[in-house]
Amino acid sequence: MAAIEMKHIDKVYDDGFHAVKDVNIDVQDGEFIILVGPSGCGKSTLLRMIVGLEDISSGDMVIGGKRVNDLAPRDRNLSMVFQNYALYPHLSVYENIAFPLRLQKMDGAQVDQKVREASALLELDEHLERRPANLSGGQRQRVAMGRAIVRDADVFLFDEPLSNLDAKLRGQMRAEISRLQKRLGITTVYVTHDQVEAMTLGDRVAVLKRGVLQQLATPRELYENPGNLFVAGFIGSPPMNFVPATVTGDGVELPFGTVTLPDEKAKAVEGKDLLIAGIRPEHFEDASLLDENQRASGSSFRQKVDVVEWLGNETYAYIPFEAPPEVQQQLEQLEKDLDGESMRTQVVIALDGASRIKEGDEAEIHIDATKMHLFDPATGENLTVDLDNAGIVPANEASREEVPA
């Protein structure tokens, strides 16, 4: 096992495209780190620089205390699992797993021992004589993982390994990968564009956008304390709602009513004018279902509900709103950054399944003001979270982009 230090890593291609920009990430020995972001954010490029498949334009890649910039991939003692499995179709499962050991000219008895240990760990014993074409997608991915395990590598690297699997199988494989990593205790870097994988697998998650590290934190910290609009919009499903907010004394005026802010949030936005309020769908509720103590934690408003989707255990209600041009521009830019994730001017509200709100109703909706975030429309910065005191490792100063107007 080994720690990984990425020090001011840059990648600039020959055509001038700047794919990775001054990224600093320290992966501790035995830690499971996720690199996540939309297509083109630089996550796979960063992973390929760790393994040595991409040259580093500037900066230092340190693995196990040793600078490896100039080392060939075979000399870094890393194991990589790819999205497309990369199995040899003419070889059996046994021989696919054994292949890296054969290259090392390992003794046959040792090869057999290691293959069977990996096979037992991954529940592949009954498939050892089969060919990859006769296996399911999940079984093929386990074979690829088995080939990585037998190498006794210092680090596991996963490049979107579950992208080709259906939703049910992805859930099963997530659990298997998590159990395997905890059992082996090996340092792991995992690339994905799927926030569910990021939130369920990682000890910490690095969120990237256009090659820039936006925030590095635990999944819970990312969800509860996003550092900027992009992280807030990327983490969470359904995504966070963003609405215009005008500061009014100790509160903010939203398109559907005034919300009184807790003292620390009111102080953080003192002297500001127009902001963007971020409210997660699950931080609304049907006010008729709450007692007086619950109502005291926020504010309520009455609004006509446009669409209702009842899913049994929860209900989604949609409420349209109008946004001024400066806020609408930010939402349109954010939609582009999030690979087209809709940031339309409507609020999505996740209600308890017991709610009886129907389409067309003028319903009383409660907002938990303690969970509201307020963002600067010019920079996208979250004004109502203290990154240092929240225990979040923010992006370095050079990485703090100003969001285009």
Image (cartoon, rainbow, N blue to C red):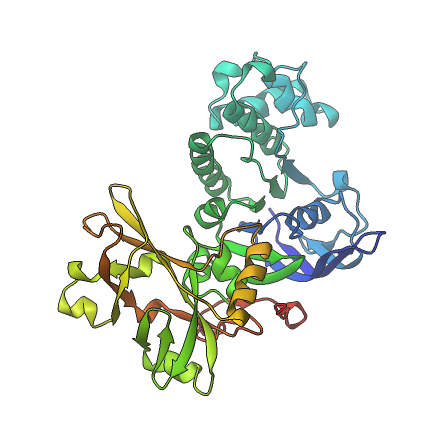
Residue 245 seen in this snapshot? yes
Q: In the current view of this chain or complex, which residue is farthest to the right?
A: 14
Out of 330 and 305, give the one closest to the viewer: 305
Percent position of residue 100, x then y? 69, 27
Task: Give the residue displayed 60% in from the left and 30% down from the top.
Answer: 150
Closest to the observer, 209 or 248: 248
Q: Quadrant of residue 83?
A: top right
Q: Quadrant of residue 312?
A: top left
In the rendered image, the vertical position of residue 66 relative to residue 386, given as above or below: above
Return the residue found at the far top: 129
Residue 125 position, x and y percent, is 49, 18
Left or right of 368? Residue 168 is right
Residue sitting at 35 percent across and 67 percent down?
Answer: 371
Q: Quadrant of the C terminus?
A: bottom right
User: Which of these two is toward me, 238 or 213?
Assistant: 238
Residue 216 shows up from this direction: no
289 displayed left or right of 30: left
Q: How many marks?
A: 0
Where residue 232 sits in the image (x, y, percent)? 48, 61
